[in-house]
Amino acid sequence: MQERNNELSRREFTRTTLNGVAAMMTVNYAQNSAAKTGNRIHLGGPVFADYHSPEEWVNAVKALGYSAAYCPVDANADEKTVQAYAVAAEKSGIIIAEVGVWNNPLAADAEERRQALEKCRVQLYLAERIGARCCVNISGSRGRLWDGPDRLNLTRETFDMIVEITRSIIDAVNPKRTFFTLEPMPWAYPDSPDSYLELLKAIDRKQCAAHLDPVNMINSPRRYYDNAEFLRECFKKLGPHLKSIHAKDIILQTKLTVHLDEIVAGQGGLDYRTFLTEAAKLGNIPFMLEHLQTPAEYEQAAGYVRSVAGELGLEY
């Protein structure tokens, strides 16, 4: 196993600081977990405004009407900065939902694979430092595109590779309060609630959890048209393991053979009434808008989510 780089192994993050912050976050997590369930989602998304301090970041998040946000710093931030943002988020009631990785741990090229795994470890460590709900990556692809389809992606051999890779990432960092998660994909593991549960069982690590992106698993007309039932299945099976949710929409096009495209929330076929109802049952889950192009599109998507949540009597 490759050793962690300087960012991961540096000792700025003293044992005293870690224990103190971990204790603070443990108390707050316990309080959050006791929050009333069934009527609340934590809507979030990207922050496009420039910010140069935790206070400016909090103001930017609040100006968007969000109570959840993506990680506001990168892994090169010094420990004082990381902890300042963590404290600001906690004081303002903003959930730092996730730290993304977005690379290919299954890359065929040895150097690309080494770098991908190193970044997974570094980003998981950042999630631990700042108290994010999770660190998320895709499992990867055996093909030329880092996130693309390949005939080997859904084989048992690849499943076993994902298990060993994920274990190695978690074991190298040994997080205590955050979780490593895999975003579902239409052509790679996990591609269904059942395959996700199988992976979690096989990985067998306490700090391995689930990340839900239901649109990424809607990969057939049948699943598209039956998406309300599929959403209920996702939450029934994965709910106890979920740490963050990606929210978008999907539309089935009419051109042959099958074309399914992401689209702004409210313009596709996803049953948002079911989506929000099931998410709210978890009580304290980040519901994160993603993959849109402009602030205006995010504003439109957020407006739609809020309108449906309002109809359902949900807080957001």
Image: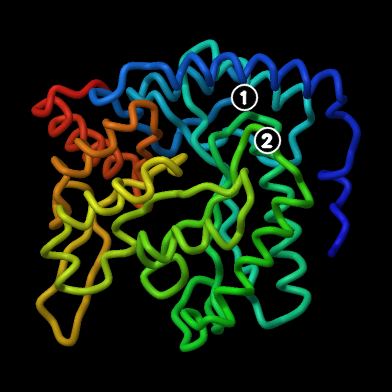
In the drawing, what numbered circle is on residue 52? Answer: 1
Q: Residue at x 39, y 67 (%)?
A: 191
Residue 48 placed where, x, y %?
45, 36
Mark 2 element type: helix
Report the number of discs.
Answer: 2
- Which quadrant does the N terminus fall into? bottom right
Q: Closer to the observer: label 2 or label 1?
A: 2
Say which residue label 2 marks. 128
Residue 149 placed where, x, y %?
44, 80
In depth, the one of 24 and 100 nearer the eye is 24
Q: Residues within 10 Å of mark 2 (few under 14, many from 20)?
A: many
In depth, the one of 31 and 251 nearer the eye is 31
Query: What colour scheme governs how the chains and residues are painted in the rendered image of this protein?
Result: rainbow
Three-letter code for the amino acid on which mark 2 is drawn: Glu
Q: Residue at x 70, y 51 (%)?
A: 170
Residue 111 placed where, x, y %?
78, 75
Q: Residue at x 72, y 73 (%)?
A: 112
Three-letter code for the amino acid on which mark 1 is drawn: His
Residue 35 occupies quadrant: top left
Check the image and report above or below for 30 versus 128. above
Residue 244 occupies quadrant: top left
Q: Residues within 10 Å of mark 1 (few under 14, many from 20)?
A: few
Residue 117 occupies quadrant: bottom right
Instruction: Point out the residue furthest to the top here.
Output: 91
Mark 1 element type: loop
